[in-house]
Image (tube, rainbow, N blue to C red):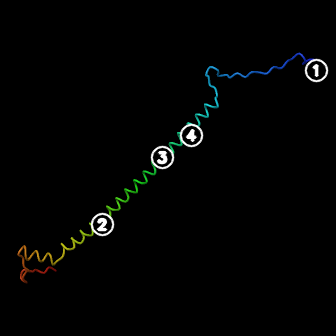
Amino acid sequence: MAGIYQDITVTPMTIRPRNRKLGATFHPKTSLKILIFLFFIVLIGSLLICAWSNVRTINLGYEITKLHDERSALLELRKKLALELANLRSPERIEAIATNELGLSPPNRKQVIMVQ
């Protein structure tokens, strides 16, 4: 049997790409450049998002402080208005205005009608 295979010679095969028309070739240097470019794009995007987040946080802090000050001023105004309302509703003030400015006097017994 050894004599049968003596005439056969084995040659290495060349592998040809099937999609030769597409021209798709793999270049390690090009793909490394693309990966580095994408890495820097993601890095810059992340840094921009972090910077925006920090600026937004600072602006919201200023806005909270401004609203807190405005709330304090409104509470102070509310206290002043409540005090003024109490002063305007006082019976002594109403009686003084009725007698001095409007010329009114307390009613006589005959003018008062009791309702049951």
Mark nearer the N terminus (3 vs 1): 1
The amino acid marked with disc number 2 is Leu
Q: Residue 11 location in percent, x, y?
A: 81, 19
Asked if marks 3 and 1 touch (Cβ < 8 Å), the reply is: no
Disc 3 residue type (three-letter) = Ile
Front-lying residue, 23 or 100: 23
Task: Give the farthest residue toward the bottom.
Answer: 109
Q: In 3D space, how far apart are the residues under numbered discs 3 and 2 (Cα atoms)?
A: 38 Å
Element type where label 1 sits in the image: loop
Residue at image point 94% right, 18% down: 3
The circle on residue 39 is 4
Going by the image, does 74 lie left or right of 48? left
Comes first in the chain, label 4 or label 1 = 1
Q: Residue 84, percent across and down?
A: 21, 71
Q: Amino acid at mark 4?
A: Phe
Mark closer to the observer (4, 2): 4
Instruction: Return the residue at label 3.
Output: 49
Whether residue 4 is situated above or below residue 110 in the rendered picture: above
Mark-to-mark CA distance, 3 and 1: 75 Å
Q: Earlier in the sequence, mark 3 or mark 2?
A: 3
Residue 105 numbered mark, or none? none
Disc nearest the viewer among 3 and 2: 3
Residue matched to label 2: 75
Check disc 1 and report the residue beneath it: 2
